[in-house]
Image (tube, helix red, strand yellow):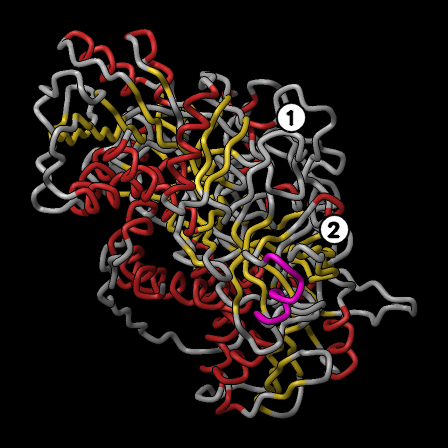
Amino acid sequence: MKSVLRLMIASFLVCTFLDQVVAQSGYDLARWAEIPAVAGYEQELTQAIRDELKSLSPHTDNLGNVYVTVGHGAPHRLVVTSIDEPGYVVSEITPDGYLRVQRLPQAPPNAVFDLLHAAQPVWVITREGKRIAGVFAGLSAHLQPLRQNPPKMAHPDEMYVDIGAQTADEVLAAGVKLLDPLVLTRNRWPFLVGDREIAGPAVGARFGCTVLLEAAKKLAMTKLSGTTTIAFAAQQWTGGRGLDRLLNEVQADEMIYLGRLQPPSTSGTGPGESAITVRTGVLLGVSDSTASLTNFASELKALADAKHLSFTPAVSTPPRIASYAKPTPFPERFAQLAIETRWPVTPAETLSLRDLSDLENFLESYLQIPELNKGFQISPVAGGRDFVLADLVEASGVSGHEQAVREKIKSWLPTWAKTKTDAAGNLILHWGDGNTGGKTPKIVFIAHMDEIGYEVRSIEPDGRLLVDVLGGGFAEYFLGHVVLVHKSDGSVTSGVLELPVGWDKPNFEWPHTPRAIDEVVHVYLGTRSTEETRKLGVQTGDWITVPKEYRPLLGTRAKGRSFDDRVGCAALIEAAKALGPNLSGRDVTFIWSTEEEVGLKGAAAAAERLAKESRAPDFVFAIDTFVSSDSPLESKRFADAEIGKGFVIRAVDNSNITPREYVDRVVKLAQENKIPVQYGVTGGGNDGSVFPRYGAVDIPLAWPLRYSHSPGEVIDTRDLDALSKIVTTLARNW
C-alpha cells in the first residue's frame, strides 16, 4: 500500500523542492491515517508513535496519551494534537455469526456518519492486533420495490457486520470478541485528488499527528530557549479525556492545539450548489472573527507573515472537554490551529497537501526548528492476482467501457479458445458448426462484463464534474466516498462524489425518492476551473468507479464489488476450461456481454444478430446474480436463497418467468451430478430475457449474493464452483 501511494503521489508532483515537501507530507499522512484508532482503543497508534519517538524517551500515561519533553526552563510550550477517530465497538455477537455494534463516541459526529458505513468494507481489530475483514450489511436495491417500511441503515439499531461467519462460535474462533473496535478499511488508500489534495477516512484526524511527529524528531537537534512538550492526546472524541489529563500533567505557559476546527453552527454544500470557497494555508480558531487577535494570536500571525504563509482566522469552538467535574482550563496563552478539511468525518474527508506543508512550516518556525531538506523515494509497485475471480473483480469496466474486463477474460481462457468480439463489444466463444441435424438444441450461456458506475456528462465552470449514473443502486453507498476517474488515455485520477445539500445539518435525512440514484451528482477533483480539470486530462465521456478490492472473509466467503457479474464471467471461464476444445455434436455459445446494467444492450444486440443469421438459440442460460435476502436487513419471504448452499435457478424475476418443467429438469440434472442447487424468486432483470422474442426459452442461472450493487457485496466461493459445474453439465447434456 505504501509503495502504491508513493507512486501515485510522485506521478502527479513535479520535482521542485516544495513539491518534494508536499509529497513527503502526503506519504507521512497516509502512513499515520492508515492505523486505526477508535476513541479509547488507540493502542496500536500510540505504540507506533512511541516507536517513532523512541530516541526521545516518550512518556505514556494510562489513558493512552504519549508525549515527549525537550529543553528546560521557561517558557514551557505545550503543542498537542488528538489522535483518535470515531468508530464502533462490537457490542453483541448473534447466534448466526453477525456482529452488532455501538458507536464511539455514542453520539454521532454528523447526521450521515452511520449511513455512510452501510454496505462498506470494514476491519475488526482483535485483541491480538489482527485485522479481520468484514462489511456492514446493506439493503439490496432489487428487493426494495413495494416493500413496507424497510430499514434506513442510519442507526446502530439497524447495523450488522458480516465477517463471513455462520455461527457465534466461528466468530470467536476467528479471534473476534466483544469490545473489539471497527473502522472502515484502508487498503489501497488514501487517494490523491487532483494534484495537491488527499482524501480518505481519518485524514482530518491525523494531520496534526503527522506534523507533530516530524517536529518532535527535529527538536532534539535544535537549540531553543525554554521547554517544549509535544503531546498526542487520546480519547478526544469521548469528552476530551486525554486533553484534560495532559493539562494536569503538563503545567504549560502557552499551548497550541492542532485539530479540526468545529464551527458553532454548520452549513453544507452539495451537488446543487457551487463548490465551497476553500480557505487555504493555516487556520486560527477564534470565537469572533470581528474581534482583534489576542497577544499570543498576534505573535503567531507575525510568525506566519514572516514566512509568507497564509494565516486566516476562522470562527470555531475550543477543543471539547466534557466532564462531570469542572474542566481544566487552557493556559491564558492558547491557540487552536488547523487546515481546511472538506466533508469532515466522512469516508471522503479531503485536505490540501500544500496546506499540510504550510502548517508544518509554520510549526517549525514557532518551535525555532531550522529548515531541512526532505527526500522522497519512489518504490516499485507489486501487483497481479493468481485467482480468476479476484482478477476479474479488481478490473474496472462500467457499462460501455468493458475493455479491461474483456481483456482479462481472454487472458484467463485456455489457448485453444478462439474468441470473437462483435460490434456491441460482446466476447463470444462457440463450439460446433451448427449442423447437428436438429438432434441437440442450440444453447447460449451469457454473463455480463459491466458494472455500475458513473460517466462524465460535462465539466462545470468551477472545475467539478457533472456525472450521469450508469446502473442502479442506493446513492448513499457511493456519495461521500472517494471515486476513481478513468481517463481516455488509460490513466486514473481520484475524486470525491459530493454529498447532498445540507448533509452536515443536525437534522439532515438522506433524500429517498424512487429515482434518487439518478439525481444530479458532482465529483470534486481539487480543481477550481474547467481549465484546471482539463489539465488533469479529464474530459467528457470519461467514466468513474468506486475503489474496490477482492478480500477473503472467514471460511469460503469473500467480499468485494462487481461480483455482479464477475462471478458469472468466472463461471463461464471455468466451464470453458472443463469442456475443452471439442464438444462433439453440440451447438454451444458462451457470450460475455456488455451494457447489461443500462438495459441489456449487449445481450439485445447479440440476440438480434443471431436471429438474423438464423442461429437463434433454443435455450438461453443467463448467468447472473440471484439478489438474496440472506441478510439481517431483508425480508425472508422473498429471494430466500442462502449463500454457500449452491447455485440458484432464478425461476422468477422482473424480466422473466421460467416454465417449471425446465426448473425441475435443471434441478434433476444438478442432483444427478451431486451439484448443490436452489431455486426461487428475486428482483431485477437478466440478459436472457431479450432472447425469447426470437423463440428461445430463458432459464437464468445464478449464485446468491448479499448486499447487491454495493461496495460490500458478499459471496460464498462454493457457489461459484457449483455454478461452473452446472454450466459444464448443461453444455454437455441439455
Q: Nearer the viewer, residue 239 or 181?
A: 181
Residue 127: mark in rendering: none
Left/right placement of residue 85 relative to residue 353 reads: right
Distance between the Cα atoms at labels 2 and 1?
34 Å
| Residue under pointer 2 | 287
Q: Nearer the viewer, residue 77 or 385?
A: 385
Q: Residue at x 75, y 38 (%)?
A: 506
What is the x, y in percent for residue 150? 70, 30
Image quadrant in which you'd find residue 47 = bottom right
* Quadrant showing the N terminus: bottom left
Q: Main secondary structure of the magenta part?
A: helix
Residue 543 on the magenta span? no
| Residue under pointer 1 | 511
Residue 168 on the magenta span? yes
- Above or below: residue 301 compared with residue 719: below
Image quadrant in which you'd find residue 702 = top left
Circle 2 — which element? Answer: loop
Question: Magenta part of the protein: which range?
Answer: 166-174
Other residues around mark 1 within 10 Å, as few (<14) / some (14–19) / many (≥20): few
What is the x, y in percent for residue 218? 45, 82
> Sequence-wise, which precedes: disc 2 or disc 1?
2
Looking at the image, can residue 465 be seen?
Answer: yes
Residue type (three-letter) at the residue carrying disc 1? Pro
